[in-house]
Image (cartoon, rainbow, N blue to C red):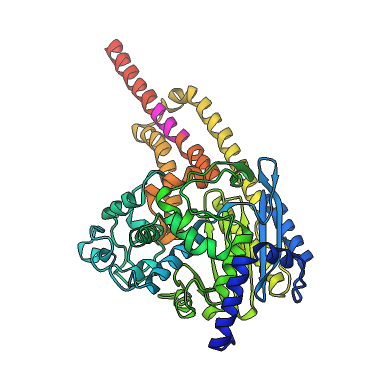
Amino acid sequence: MGYGKNQMKVLNALVLLALIFLPGLNLVQAATEPAGNLDFAALDSVIEAQMAKHALPGMALAVVEDGHIAYLNGYGAAGNGQRMTAQTKMVIGSQSKSFTALAIAQLAEQGKVDLDAPVQAYIPWFRVADEAASSQITLDHLLHHTSGLSDSGFGVVLPPETTSEQAVRALVQARLTAPLGTQHQYFNLGYSVLSYIVEIVSGQRYAEYIQAHIFDPLGMTSSSAEPFPPADLAQGYTRLFGFPMPMDEAFLVYGVGDGYIVSTAEDMARYALAVMVGGAGLVSPDMMERILTPGLGFYGMGWVIVDNGQKIIHGGANQTFRTDVNIYPSRRRAFILLGNEGHQFDHFVSAGQLTAAVEAVVLGNPAVPTAQGWSVRWMGWGLGLFVLALSVLHTRNFLALRYWRERVRKFSPAKRAWDVAISFLIPTVILGVVFWQVSSFYGNRFNLWTNLAYLRLGLPDVFILMIIGTVPDYLQGVIKLFLRQGNSKEGILQNDYLG
């Protein structure tokens, strides 16, 4: 970053003092200080345009530049009659992993854990389905998602109230889907194991450790790692046929360290500042460098490293919330976007468009046209019209069943059997193609049982589409079987009478 070691130490100390002792003052300055050539009006404009395009309920923004918070703003609604602000609390999803990684790194610098030690050094009973791998999986493997474990190899749906210990014990059913240490495979529960190790080694609950060793030193006064939602959490939304739909998301007790920390755009800006200056005293600059060094591929310890560190990112995708943290070390800038909409279409469509539009302004690049790319709102409307058309078609088909016996009476037995079979074959092929495509898209993050369990919450309109597109056909097939049986009995009676 262009600093000598002594200069870096002085800068780290100054930033840490500012974060600890001057939180209020820092924010007042942040909102009023000029910040290079950043165009705050343009930021507001692109965010509001993207929100209108995709029908997003609310967004919160924080921008960091040259060691201070340059801009904070909120857009839209936080639910319950409240407007969205940079101080609105939201779930940050998988961005939580970076806090767990930082906690492990702190414990490593204290000599309490060895990043290269096997998990069994801290959890002697730790087991996965592969006995040999059980003793060889290290903390470093879990930190970089190179343990060989993946969602596709673990088809257990854990209840929300499952504890960290219970979740770790459940991994005895997890099979490796790649040889240990050979491939990056994102696996949420790997970070649940790490958060449990934080508790074992520190002697504190995970929430207490994160509060005392990260939140408090950085002045993140509105953040929490408790396994339950705070009373003033923003209303989260999913989406139904393009329209935002409020939904209360269950917190996974075992999953706080990998996906359920609560924070604000303002607090996350403080966190981004600490990362940008080598750890701000939370860890040494050398350890922060290790955190931000990718293992296999692009993943460091809780962070995604792009273009050899020119861009450091992560984010979070819950059922009802979205987080994006983007850091540009060489430009000394960063921005944080938090939103209270969590539909999968948003995670893969609107979030990318919104982030690209904000990044262009923050980095002074050419503006990204709002019209560029699909609208999630319109995608939902199209899905709704398709479901409506299917419903009309199935209604017509059900009404036509009244005449089915007469229609097929003259069919040959083979043709009659095919007419029945087609009602089972078509929906089965549709389901097969859908799951094949989804499996191809998600790769090692796809598991039939866990994805089905998630579908009704993460993609409720797609879940309805699957039901409408398949169940009526199966029902029609069953009805045809009964009608066919009735035809057969009628034929037998007629033959008896004629004989």
Q: Is residue 263 above or below residue 184?
A: above
Q: Is residue 112 inside the magenta stretch?
A: no
Q: Nearer the viewer, residue 455 or 359?
A: 359
Residue at (49% x, 23% y) in the render: 403
Residue at (57% x, 77% y) in the render: 12
Residue at (61% x, 59% y) in the render: 351
Q: Residue furthest bottom?
A: 4
Q: Is residue 327 visible?
A: no
Residue at (44% x, 59% y) in the render: 209
Span shown in magenta: 472-480
Q: Nearer the viewer, residue 347 or 144?
A: 144
Q: Residue furthest left?
A: 131
Quadrant in the picture for residue 160: top left
Q: Quadrant of the C terminus?
A: top left
Q: Is residue 473 inside the magenta stretch?
A: yes
Image position, residue 228 (x, y; %): 48, 46
Image position, residue 483 (x, y; %): 39, 23
Q: Nearer the viewer, residue 390 or 215?
A: 215
Image position, residue 361 (x, y; %): 72, 70
Q: Is residue 424 above or below residue 318?
A: above
Q: Quadrant of the N terminus?
A: bottom right
Side of 290 where 324 appears, left or right:
right
Quadrant in the picture for residue 138: bottom left
Q: Is residue 310 above or below residue 21?
A: below
Image position, residue 389 (x, y; %): 60, 38
Q: Nearer the viewer, residue 412 or 424?
A: 424
